[in-house]
Amino acid sequence: MQLDLSALKNVGLEHFLIVSAILFSLGIYAVVTRKNAIMVLMGIELILNSANINFIAFSKYSTASLSGHLAAIFVIILAAAEAAIAIAIVLNIYKNFLTVNIDEVDRLKQ
Amino acid sequence: MSLFDVAFYILAIITVGSAIIVVSARSIIYSAFSLLFTFFGVAGLYVLLNADFIAVTQILIYVGGILVLIIFGVMLTTKVFDVPVRTETLHVGPAIVITGAIMGTLVGVILKTKWFDAFDVQWDGTTKKIGEKLMTDFLLPFEVASVVLLVALLGAVIIARKEKS
């Protein structure tokens, strides 16, 4: 496989995409390895941020329109709603099980 | 190397470095606080990409809202006084292999693909244009998003409320 690295000389679209890919993999890593439910949430936030970087980078370099910005705004809105609901669920789990480690919470009710 | 490149590399190092601390720190409080720097780094990348409105939104909502919510969650779900606030990990080896494979694939695809990046637009202020688009092309998603936020708010209150016993 021959990679053409000449595009990497000046900062452009590829650089932002690579940063976003790294953030995405780190988010997946946090989701997969952590036991604490709140750490899993932080991983999800990293993944959403990486998606947003992609949207904005393509909006600037590839489409020259603001549609990517609008998509990023809706992603941020949904991330806020998701975080609120998830924290509520985690607090409820803590109330019932006295732990938030997701490998110990394996029943639907007490 | 132009000033733009230098700013990009500094922000990228801040973002990726603090994200590595987020996923690897033993204490969940350290993770939450380095998530702060990740969000600020991403906001800086938005500024580099000429997205001023999104950058401010990122700081307002992620740092001012979601991060505070996450820290509240940490405080409310850990017994700070008797156990150290640590998080355990599991399957670290396989996870490193798999996420490394994912990252390698993504970076390889990004480098191999011939992207269409003919434009390099410089907007002077995106807020007005975003507002116009929200009221014309994206009116339906905008309204649906307001309903989603209302439902999420009510749902969160109902789920987290103390039951009377």
Image: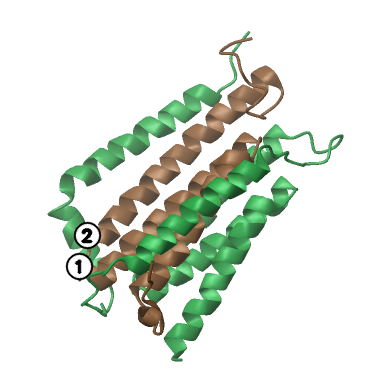
Chain B, which colour? Answer: green
- Nearest to the observer: residue A74 or residue B152: A74
Residue positioned 46% across, 91% down in the render: B1
- Vertical placement of residue A17 versus B134, above or below: below
Q: Please, what secondary structure does the residue beneath circle 2 have?
A: helix
Which colour denotes chain A? brown
Q: In the visual, does A14 lie left or right of A58?
A: right
Alpha carbon separation for disc pair 2 and 1: 8 Å
Given the current orientation, which residue lies at the most extreme front position? A1
For residue B78, above or below residue A12:
above
Q: Position of residue B101 (x, y in %)?
A: 50, 52
**In the rendered structure, are the residues bearing label 2 and label 1 in contact, judged by CB atoms less than 8 Å apart?**
yes
Can you tell which quarter of the image residue B117 is in? bottom left
- Identity of the residue drawn at 51% across and 78% down: B9
Work out whether residue A68 or residue A17 is closer to the camera in this orientation and state it.
Answer: A17
Q: Residues within 10 Å of mark 2 (few under 14, many from 20)?
A: many
The chain containing the residue under callout 2 comes to A
- Looking at the rendered image, the disc whose residue lies closer to the viewer, 2 or 1, is 1
Which residue is disc 1 drawn over? A63
| Residue B57 is at least partly visible in this image | no
Q: Residue at x 22, y 70 (%)?
A: B116
Chain under callout 1: A
Would you say B121 lies left or right of A16 here?
left
Q: In the rendered picture of this protein, how many numbered marks are placed on residues?
A: 2
Amino acid type, mark 1: Thr
Find residue A67 and name its label. Answer: 2
Instruction: Identify which residue, B17 or B125, lies in the foreground.
Output: B17
Which residue sits at x=48%, y=33%? Answer: A85
